[in-house]
Each structure stands twice: as C-alpha cells, then as structure tokens.
Amino acid sequence: MSKLRVAVLGARGRIGAEAVKAIEAAEDMELVAALGRGDKLETLAEAGAQVAVELTTPASVMGNLDFLIRHGIHGVVGTTGWTEDRLAQLTTWLAGSPRTGVLIAPNFSIGAVLTMRFAAQAARYFESVEVVELHHPNKVDAPSGTATRTAQLIAAARAEAGLGAQPDATATALDGARGADVDGVPVHAIRLRGLLAHQEVLLGGEGETLTIRHDSLHHSSFMPGILLGARRVTQTPGLTFGLEHFLDLG
Amino acid sequence: MSKLRVAVLGARGRIGAEAVKAIEAAEDMELVAALGRGDKLETLAEAGAQVAVELTTPASVMGNLDFLIRHGIHGVVGTTGWTEDRLAQLTTWLAGSPRTGVLIAPNFSIGAVLTMRFAAQAARYFESVEVVELHHPNKVDAPSGTATRTAQLIAAARAEAGLGAQPDATATALDGARGADVDGVPVHAIRLRGLLAHQEVLLGGEGETLTIRHDSLHHSSFMPGILLGARRVTQTPGLTFGLEHFLDLG
Amino acid sequence: MSKLRVAVLGARGRIGAEAVKAIEAAEDMELVAALGRGDKLETLAEAGAQVAVELTTPASVMGNLDFLIRHGIHGVVGTTGWTEDRLAQLTTWLAGSPRTGVLIAPNFSIGAVLTMRFAAQAARYFESVEVVELHHPNKVDAPSGTATRTAQLIAAARAEAGLGAQPDATATALDGARGADVDGVPVHAIRLRGLLAHQEVLLGGEGETLTIRHDSLHHSSFMPGILLGARRVTQTPGLTFGLEHFLDLG
Amino acid sequence: MSKLRVAVLGARGRIGAEAVKAIEAAEDMELVAALGRGDKLETLAEAGAQVAVELTTPASVMGNLDFLIRHGIHGVVGTTGWTEDRLAQLTTWLAGSPRTGVLIAPNFSIGAVLTMRFAAQAARYFESVEVVELHHPNKVDAPSGTATRTAQLIAAARAEAGLGAQPDATATALDGARGADVDGVPVHAIRLRGLLAHQEVLLGGEGETLTIRHDSLHHSSFMPGILLGARRVTQTPGLTFGLEHFLDLG
C-alpha cells in the first residue's frame, strides 16, 4: 500500500514540530514537506502532498487553505479564530473543488472530544451535572474554552430532553462557591501547580453518579487525533468541523 | 394523557418494594398490582396491567413471562439466570404475540449501562485500558459480573478495531499485582468497608488518559432504568436484551 | 475487664438512635441509659453511667453538661452552637470537678478529621491548594462548614510556613469560576443528586499533586469516632475540643 | 544571609542536571561544583562546598560519601542500593565526624513521602485498606517499590493498633483479581500509556472512605525535596534515613 503523502504548515511551532515527528513515525504516512513562516506554498504541490496539516496562525490560515483547496490538497486544521464569515468563505472554495476535504478541529485530543460527546449523551439521563476543569496556574482564562463548550453541549442536550433546572437548594452561599453558570450548568475552575490540563464531568441521579474525566498530561496527546484526521479527511470531501465526526461512535 | 398501568411481580423483595414506590411516585404511571410469592397472576389481567416489572427468581420467571405474553402484557425483567435455551423459549412465545415486548436487563442502572457503552466506544482509540471495580467486603465474587462484562465488551471493541495486545513491559511481578486477565484486559477488584458498588475504566494513550467512573451509592439507582424500561417496552415489540437499546445514544 | 458504662442523651434522634445501636454492639461498652426529650437526668446517676454521649440541641446541652459534670460523668458532645461564653462556662464547671473530662467534637467522622489534619500538615509543602466539597442538592449552604474550616486550617498553616499568595494568572474569568475565597484558599461547592457528603483537598507543587479525599456515604460514619471519644474521654480530664486530639498521629 | 554552598555529584545524569538547575534557581543557595563521572572529588573541598547532593550509582556512592564525611561536607543522597552493611559502614564514618550529617532518601518527592506517612497514620482507624499504583507501561516491576513500601508501613501500623485481617468475603475469584498480597494489604498495579507515576491509598470504615492520592507528573517533583534536604541536613548531624524526618508534621 502506498503511503499517504502529508505536509505540515507551521512546522517550526511547538505543536507543528511534534506533528512532523508523529507523521515521520507513522508507518502509513510519508512526510513530504515541513513549511515554516516564509516558506513557499508551491513546495506543497511540487512535493505531491495529498494532505496538509495546518498549524499556523489566524492571519495565515485563510491564504493557506485557499492554496490547498485550489490544488486539491486536503487540509487538517488546528489553527483557531473561526468566524461564520470565514467558514462561509471556506465552504464556497470547497464547492469549487468537490473532491477536497477540510477538517477543522478546535481540539485534536481524542480524549477531550470523547469526554464532550459522552457528557452530552449522558446528560439527558441525570438530574444533576457539573463540570470541573483543572489547569496549571499560568492559564489566563477561567473556565477553559473546552469546559465552557462542554457545558454548552450538556445544556443543549438537557434542553432537548426536556429537563428543567437542576435541583439546588442552596440558600446561603459564599460568592463563587457554586461556580460559574454556563447555560445553567455550574462550571468550576481549579488552578494548581503541577497540573497541565484536566477536565471532569460529574453527573448525578437517584442513587448513582457517573464521572467522565480527561487528563491531558502532554501536548503529544494531540497527535493521534491529527493522524486520524489526516487519514479520514481524504475520504471526506467538503468541510468537517470537529474531530468527533471522524470517530466511529455508532 | 392516560397513565401507564404498571404492575410489579416480586413486590415484597428489596428491589421490588423500591419499584412499587418509584412507580407510585411517577406522574405518568399508575401502580395497578403488586404481587408477592403466592399471589395469583390473574390479578394482573383483572387489574388491566399494560406492563409488568418482573423482579422474582429464576425459578418463577419463565412461568410469569408465559402468562404475561399470553395476556399481551409487556415485561420489564430484572430477574437473572438467562440461558440460551430460556431466551429461545421466550422468543418463541413472543412470536405468538407480535405486539408484546419484553425487556431483559442484567443491570438497570443507567450509569452502569452508559459506563459499559462509553468504555467500549472509547476502547478503539486508546492503546491501554484497565478496569477497576470497588465493592463492599461482603461480596463473594471477584471481579464483579459487571466488570467482567465491561472487560469483555472492551476486548471485543479492541479486536474489531485491529488493536493488538496492550503495552506492558512488566518483567517481575508479585502474584496478582497486575490483576485478573479478562480477554487481555486487566481487571482489578477492591473490597473496602464503606463502599457499595463502584467501577472505573481507565483508558490511556499518548499524553492523555480518559477515565469513566460509575458510583452506585444506593440500590434506588435501578429505579430510573426500570421506569424508562416500562415506558419504552410498550413501543418495542419482541425481545430486547440490555437497557442500552432503550437509551438514545445516536 | 469490666465494660464502660455509657449513656446516650438525645437517644431518639437519628444520630442518637444510631449511637444507641453502636454502643450496644461494642464489646467493651454497656448501654446503661438512653434518654430522650423529657426524660429525667437523674436516671444517668442511678444507672451508674461513666460516660454520656450528648446528642441533643443547643437549647439543652448546657443544662445537661452542668448535671454531668456535677455528677462526675464524662461527656462526649456532638451538639453544636458553641460560643466563647459557653466554652468559658464549661471550663469553669470542669475546674470544680478536676477528674471529669468533656470532649466536644464538631465532627465525629474520623475520615473528616484526618482529612483536615493531613491537609493542614501538607499545606506548607505545596505552592497551590484548593478545596472541593460535593454534597446532595438539598443542602442549603455552600460551601459546607467542614470545607470552610478545612480552608481556614490550610490558610493558617500556609501563613505559619511563610507562604504567600497562591500562583494564579487568571486575567479573565466568568463570575464564580474560581470558587469562593476563604482566607486565600479557593473553595468549590458541587451539588449533585446521588451524593451524600464528600470533600477533596488538592495540593500542587512542582511536578506533582497530592489529593486527600473523604467520602461520607452514611451517617453511621460518626459512630467509630463517638466510640473512640467515649473510651478516651475517661482518661482525659478537662475540656477537649476536636476529635483530632484523641487520634494518635505522632 | 550568606548562601548555602551546594555541590552536585552525578550532575550529568537526568536527575542530576535537574538538581543543578534547581540549586542555581534557589535564592538561598549557590552552586559551587557540578561533578560528573571522572571529575575529581577534591574540587568539592576546593570549592568550599557545605553540602553535596549525591546522585550517582551504587558503585560510586560509598567512595563519594567517604570523601564527603572526611571533609565535613554534608550529604544529601538519592542513590539507591542500601544494605545493612553499607549503612553500618556509613554510621561508623559519621561517628568520626560528629558534626556532619547525611540524609539518604529512597524518595525525594514530598508528595510521595506524605502519602506514605498519612496512609500509615490513618491505617489504624479503618477496617479496610488497599493500595493502587498506576504507572506508564514501560515499567518492568509490579508493584512499584513505593507501593510495596507503603503497604508494609500500613501493615505495621495495623499490627501495632491490634487490627486483625481485613474483612473480605471473596469466595470465588479470577486469579489476580484481588491484587498482590503485601503483608495482608492488597496492592494493585495498573499500567497505562499516558501515565507517569501515581499512587492511591484507599481506606474504608463504617460509612466512609478516605483516599490519599499522589500524582507525579514530572521528575522535577524531586527538586523541592532535595533542596529541603540540603537546607536541613546542615543542622542534623549523623545519619537520617528518609525525607519524612525532615518534614514538620507534629
């Protein structure tokens, strides 16, 4: 079987460098180009890249994707900053190249994606649910984007299942004790030296609780998701938003 | 909306008595009969039961189901001891009453069912997976049936995904340190005063882990699953084995 | 060896009834009196009680202790509502009966007491520490009294060790995300159906974390502490505040 | 205040290199020598080292300590392989240099040391206790040395408190399910990709459990313990075995 020809854009960043190594180590892939700032995109076409992993910046990503789609190179995109306008533009470009696929994933950690998915699936079956995220103390925002997104997905699942407000008899509370309210789901943020990035979803019903916890101990945790994305995007024309669509969870 | 007319068989047992209370408390149900040992099954028909919750013994269950199916009463069955012969017999009976549904569930805890399902779904995406179950010290078997079943489902999912043996460099070990081997999945059983029934599935991949934990703190945890079963079985003719088939996990 | 003669005051309350059973079951104790509201205190003296377990109300406790101390009966007190005035009064009474001992314990759960103690001991060795308490959703206050007390003990230990403010780069946060601030220690309160009373202290330093967790699954968890208190108070004249003083933690 | 003059032996190993950086970063210390294999010990004396951190090999450690003690340089030793003979030899040498102190620590992680200590202290108050250790799958022994040592300390504490065998009604078990038996304490070893080194001690009594968990996420976790050792050894003549003796846990 011939190997999948993969390139990396943003290859000199921290995650990009990791991706270069992961692709080199994958038996079914060949790294054909590793571009950094200032390198020419034409290299990708000359190298015969089938998939490009895009790990640059919001300022560069649209230009890069324009090039990729025009050349029929599939994209696996970790760069952030997506707006409706940008997604609409991308969809238009993809319409002109109907065999090309682009995966945009806010999070390439399979564990994080599964946590969100399982939490949303379970949410309809439990009266109570709260989210706790735990990070190193250098993090500047609280709660994390992933925790906020998880709470929103949970809230949507509860609404769809017709669940009302969560039971909570709290009458007197210290400010902040009950966490932040994200669409009715309490979210708590812990900052602790020694931690990296962790999230726990606690669901409670009559006589039982279900806990789904994701621990991210190294940013290498993004690599299996990036490789999976590269393999699947070649068979998935058009725009896919979210790695969960490439997981077999039937 | 008229209420669902529900009966309980085995109503004087511990779980049965709980079920009686749960049905009485459910706004969409009416308890129409609560039978114990020696009570006449005819009562069910006279009371107009639409669903019977069967929580008796392996010695009684087949006779009870024969009666239920002949009278077109749907069954929600928590009694254990199912063999292939028994299931075949049941299928034959149900063929003769094509509108009647029977749900047999080895475990009515929604949390336990979701834990098994999520563990099996996630298993294909992680190199390593182990199961830890924790129970009160009066339990006579180790590991628990639920843990063994969970490990088997995980092993099947790994096999289907083409995963090989788990990484494990252990060269010298004390006997038992690495747990019991269930189809290649290590299972560890903890017995601790103060606990009831708990299970944790740990999945590990490059740089991250995913943990799914179920804590059963009271046998009332079976009630939401029994009620859900009673509601759904009326719309599900034939035999359904496992509560997971009644959960919306699409 | 002759058995310790123990009485219970407040024997018809939920905890009191549990205490009666626990004393009856203890091989080294004899239950000599079980008094409820309206019963005469003289019964205690007539029954030859050596120790009385006081589980009544703030309105009754001072009268009861006055009687106990005058009769040289040791007291193990779980009733709450202690003020400096009340403690001063008690000390005066005890000065007049120099062989009598009284233990007042805000919490008889040995696990809860050890959690607080270990948390305070460890606090001086870690840069970061946060407290998470988890309770059933019918609880009216947040955070729990135990969590607040734990955070205060941790804060005092940090101050004594010369530790400054905890590292926390949070620049933008949703209201409440970082929990309640108790003397500089973040405290988070989770309310979940299915839970009883749980507390977790998370400590983090360079490259490592230490977690101390207490799960209270039944109020029978107070009994070992009450029995231990009854045994030790007979050898500990004067006032002892807090079960931790009766634990051998040298 | 003048800075403590500290040297490192084994400075080119992984932990040694980390120690060099940690000492350089410590405000109250000055790194005066960093020796690797083949470097002359005389450098230590010439540099005026007050404390040497010894992180070499069992083959080198005795010669190094002989030199240190003869020159009145305090030692903080992480090298393993201690036997009674070696410790006796060391004691003899130290007798000839009564102001010199040597700390030998099998584990410099403060979190690991506190876990062992707290587990042993708590063990006497709980009927049940089990140890779970979790490591990366490249580890060759199971259970870990730390887990075995923890179980032994727990077993000793239980024996001292007069506790008998743990409650366990297990009648039928799969081989290995109940873990390894270390002096009557079950020890379970989990191997999972994505983990580094983790340990959990679970204690259970009537109605409650206490869990003490240590997560080691990076070997930098040894540094605070090494620095603390270097500060305290200068005021502690003679041989000290175990970092716990330098922690204030009164």
Image (tube, coloured by chain):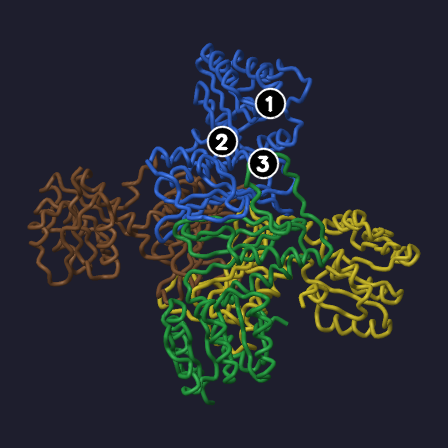
Chain colours: A green, B yellow, C blue, D brown
Mark number, residue C32: 1
> Mark 2 falls within which chain?
C
Q: Secondary structure at mark 1?
A: strand
Q: Position of residue B113 (x, y in %)?
A: 64, 61
Q: Quadrant of the C terminus of chain D?
A: top left
Q: Nearer the viewer, mark 1 or mark 3?
A: 3
Please indicate, yes or no, whether residue A208 appears anywhere in the rendered image.
no
Specify the amino acid type for callout 3: Ala
- Between D32 and D77, the one nearer to me in the picture: D32
- Circle 2 packing at 10 Å, graded few (<14), some (14-19), many (20+), is some
Q: Which residue is mark 3?
A: A173
> Mark 3 falls within which chain?
A
Q: Nearer the viewer, mark 3 or mark 2?
A: 3
Q: Which residue is mark 2?
A: C228
- Tell me what residue is drawn at x 45 percent, y 66 percent: A221
Specify the amino acid type for callout 2: Leu
